[in-house]
Image (spheres, coloured by chain):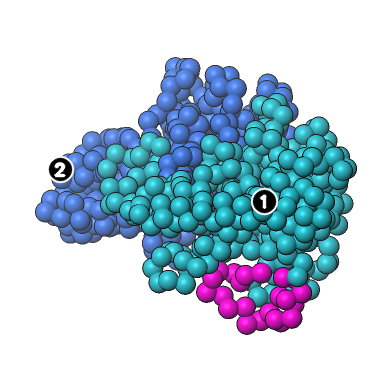
Chain colours: A blue, B cyan
Amino acid sequence: MSEKTFGQALNEALTIAMEIDKNVFIAGEGVGVSIHQDPNTATHGLLEKFGRRRVKDTPVSEAAIAGLALGASCMGLRPVVEIMFFPFITLASDMLVNHAGKLRYMSGGKSSFPLTVRVRAGLGFGAGSQHSQNLESWIAHSPGLKIVWPATPEDAKGLLLSAIFDPDPVIVVEDMMLNQMPGDVPTGDVRTPLGKARLVSPGTDCTLVAYGTALYTVMEALKPLGEQGISCEVIDLRSLVPLDKACILDSVRKTGRLVVVHEANRFCGFGAELAAMVADEAFDALKGPVKRVGAPQIPVPTAPPHENIFKPGPEEVVTAVREAMGK
Amino acid sequence: MTENQIIPDLRIRLYKSMVLTRKFEEKIMDLSQEPGRMPGMQILANGQEAVATGMVSALEPEDVIISNHRSHGHLLARGADLNSLMAEIMAKETGVNGGKAGTLHLSVPDLNVLMTSTVVGAGPPLALGAAFAQQYKKTTGITVVFFGDGAAAEGSVHEAMNLAGVWKLPLLFVCENNCWAGAQRPEEHCATPHIFQRAKGYDMPGRSVDGNDVEAVYNLGVELVEYCRSGKGPALMEALTYRMRGHGEQDRQHYVDPKELESWAAKCPILGYRQKLLDGGVLNQAQIQAIDQDAEARVAAAAAFGDESPYPGPETVLTDVFVQPPSA
């Protein structure tokens, strides 16, 4: 165990994967030579360590980057490609949605695509909606794709390692707002399994589910909620597909209430799926309405005060929990 | 390689392959007329047999093929099993992909026909990855991707050509220019009449060939495959041919001048080659007849095999999405 930032933890995962498997290569815009010289970036120093054969800077061509991953994975390599900002995944989406997610099924199980797409996400740096937009529900809605979203340095490393060595296409969302965050990271090839949520803190009155940066918004809300005598159970989802249904359902059966928090638009967001799942499968346990905290249905604004309104804050979490409690 | 280096045995193989493809697709045409026999869109390459046969015959078994809507000729020239191919086109359980591909998504990884994409223009980026893997693993294989003149308008094709040029990948782009993109003619969708000239912009050789002349396609194929295999980088072949059928068997081609169809029918790659082989004494009439009959018998047997095969059962509808499926 050693202390590392979230970005360093990602870097360590890539390093370990490339060391233990010569079929792992990385590609993307600036994964070798970056405009940033930040040692907290996931690909920092990998070109020097592994050379140009395995660390491939590409043209600004997202469809080609995703196609590269797809074709190479089908030939037995384990590509790890980067999409610089989440909204740019739309340029690669034909390769991911129409090909990575479908070709195994349509081959009758003859082909497989063990590829990883790292995509950098996040709000709060004033870049506006073409660089900030969380599209996880688009991906989760597309069959054949897995998607994970670490919130801690330990899981950044562990989930990325699991994704790289998973036999299926996995999208790993890296929250840029967490990049500098330090935390304890286990040494060596220690993986976080896909499809396993993490119980962050136990509670009795209401279950709070979040992933990525939204987890810390939830954590901030715990204190005021505690002061109001409300005990919340917090779950860090970590993996959207596969989904740890049991963890959520068990918790809701205990607390009787659910609030889902994410930074994506609330409308048709991933929280809607969790709300529907709980309504379907744990309706009898519910003591109050399932609430969702998310962004309004507008493009991500640029002006800091607007962006602050857009991004769900701890006060909204407190309000939602109180409503779930009937207060 | 020059034309006179093509030995008689190869000539007969090229001819047989084109005949088999034609008969196979004619059977699909017939079956498509009967309701319920052929699911989905049957998009055929009648008239384009010389491109598939000539190009695929110029490859080694280790070479990878990425195909498109009009894939039957590529697969048959590669030696795909007729029965499981026809059954798959009928979406039957015994099909090469268990009935999950149909005609539009056929793949035979065992024969290195790695993927078929019918998202127009998606083949080249996929092929980029396959060719990269060959370069990365230092194999001698190359990748060939077939796409049409319509696909040449897709941005993904440009992205793939550019990156293949930058990384000098062993990737041969084969544009089957069949004069139609849906119901649109080249002058409506292509700023230049010559797609092969785009090669210059990606620092690769670009060559044009009469796509109805199987030996010309084969010879240029051999030359460009050798170029790609030597490590010099990608290349582009544009084979000029003609789409005799529409975009699917429901397409009645109301937008095509019948005189144009007649003129291209007269340039049929199979009829022309047959005459050449007869004139050259490579085959006689009796042998020509025997080749026709053999192809017809094999195709009829494949259609019967497909007919007798069941559709896949409900037990496979949810399988094969993931190698490691999420536990429900």
Which image quadrant is residue A203 in?
top left
Q: Quadrant of the N terminus of chain B?
A: top right
How many numbered marks are there? Answer: 2
What subunit carries mark 1? B
- Label 2 or label 1, whichever lies nearer to me, is 1
Q: Residue A93's spot in the image, x, y percent?
A: 55, 54
Amino acid residing under circle 1: Gln
Q: Which residue is mark 1?
A: B287
Tell me which residue sits at (23%, 36%) in the image: A202
Q: Which residue is mark 2?
A: A254
Does A264 sit above or below residue A152?
below
What segment carries the magenta color?
B244-265
Q: Residue A179's spot in the image, x, y percent?
A: 54, 36
How far apart marks 2 and 1 lie (CA) works out to 81 Å
Residue B250 part of the magenta segment: yes
Amino acid residing under circle 2: Lys
> Is residue A111 at all visible to an observer of this figure?
yes
The residue tagged with tag 2: helix, strand or loop?
A: helix
Q: Residues within 10 Å of mark 2 (few under 14, many from 20)?
A: some
> Is residue A260 found left or right of A158 in the rendered image?
left
